[in-house]
Image: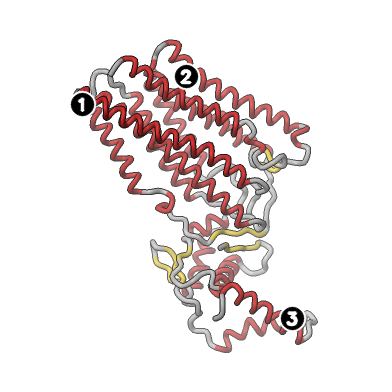
Amino acid sequence: MSAQTNTLLPLASAGLVLALRLYFLVRILWNYPLNHGPGFFLGVEVAPGFYEGRGAQWLRRYRILLLVQHLILVAAFIVPVALRRWSDLPVMAPIDVITLFSLIGGFTFWSRRTLGSSPPRLSSIAAPLEERRLSDYISWPLEAVLVALLAFSWLLLFTRGDAGFRWQSPVLMTYAVMGLLPLKIILVRNSFPLPPERTEEHHRWMEADRRYSLRVMESMRWFLAVTLAAYAVRHGFPDAATKVWLYWSFLGFALAIFLLMAGILIRGSAALAAMSRGLRPVGSWAGPFQPAPVMLHGGLTWSILYCGGLAALLLFFGR
Amino acid sequence: MFLAVDANDKRPLYQQVVDGIKALIARGDLREGMTLPSVRQVAGDLGVNLNTIAAAYRELQQEGLLAVRHGSGAVVASRRSRDVDGEEIRKPLRAALTQMALAGLSNREIVDIVRRELESLQRKGGSR
């Protein structure tokens, strides 16, 4: 494989990710706090006229943070390109995850605690009488295939990895893939009482949101796993002929998954926004027996552990 | 299909769950063989203690309406409560009728209310 191919591929992958993130910034994230209408800010019910007063400041703070986060992402793309350090381009992904969770996630957490400290407490609530089994949301055979693909990649790298192979990307990608599995379980198990008004619609929307998040995560995990397999093939097969067709097959597959993920993100987020119109965002009310959750039960712990692990790996490899 | 509870209701919470599930069975929304969510899921969704839902499921099991199997959840076992004799079944009806009479309703109004309730029960569940 030519040196040009080795340069072009990480550049193209990183460029695609950046383009998708910038599209998402403009179409979804910029006005995300207003998703449920002017009566809410990031899912917290606010007084009428909020956006004419201090709400404008809150919205400005949110957008500044959003811009800072995306500037960091753009810098993580531009710096390796300017320095021609192509192998550093994949580091963009963990930097994106860490900054997104810490800056935007942290801001959401803080604003919910500050603005939504006493959401209305409903006396009457409902729960769906449908069984929510993990196997209805997570395909265990597919999980097994995913693990097998990771194992295959590692086996190839361990036994036949050439001199050009570095640990950094495989370790980060494996961590990213497997670390998302607990979040999937948390998402499935996450529960919250439904309001008595428009119960069915709230339930349908919350279910759609759950399935959307799981699909996005799933496609991201597969994209990373197949990219890792392509990396392993590139560094594990000495036979150039086998290497070339296998490598391009894996990369073509990874690109198809990426496009699928982009489709899910773009169409899914638009469909969810349409579904949620007129509905109360989760967390904007409290049930009679427990306070309103600031975020997913277990979600905060997971975010801290996951991002902490990613940061530790980045520091370790950056030494 | 939803189970609703109300903090302002005078009945204990577990009783509201029992009555809610019974109503769904009586209306035919919950049919024999249908699986109910686990105690943990219902308790989590409503934000109540696990023991509250466990007590409700236990009572429904004792009445023969649910079969609870460890690990596989609760299944609707029957649409008829077991061990219900005529006198036992009349007790709540008698109490409700007494309440209505004390509220000053005429016999005709009471019969109308009972008929409407029965019709609403049968509308969803079909004829018994």
Residue at image position (37%, 30%) is A173
Q: CA distance from mark 1 to mark 3?
A: 85 Å
Quadrant assignment, res A113: top right
Residue at image position (41%, 26%) is A312
Residue at image position (40%, 67%) is B69
Residue A29 x, y percent position in the rendering: 59, 32
Identify which amino acid the numbered label 2 is placed on.
Phe
Determine crowd level at label 1: few under 14, some 14-19, many 20+ residues with C-alpha closer than 10 A.
Answer: some
Indicate which disc residue A160 carries. 1
Quadrant assignment, res A229: top left
Residue A7 x, y percent position in the rendering: 36, 17
Indicate which disc residue B126 carries. none
Kindly tell me whether residue A174 is visible in this rendering: no
The correct choice, above or below, for B15 with respect to A172 in the image is below
Q: Secondary structure at mark 3?
A: helix
Which chain is indicated by disc 3?
B
Given this view, does label 2 or label 3 mark the residue nearer the observer?
A: 2
Give the residue at the far top of this rendering: A83
Q: Secondary structure at mark 2?
A: helix
Task: Give the colour scheme of this rendering.
Answer: secondary structure
Which chain is indicated by disc 1?
A
Judge if badges 2 and 3 mark residues of a common chain: no
Instruction: Say which of A212 and B10 sits in front.
Output: A212
Asked whether the beta carbons under mark 1 and mark 3 sit within 8 Å of each other, the answer is no
Identify which amino acid the numbered label 3 is placed on.
Met
Identify which amino acid the numbered label 1 is placed on.
Arg
Residue B104 x, y percent position in the rendering: 80, 82
Indicate which disc residue B100 carries. 3
The residue under label 2 is A77
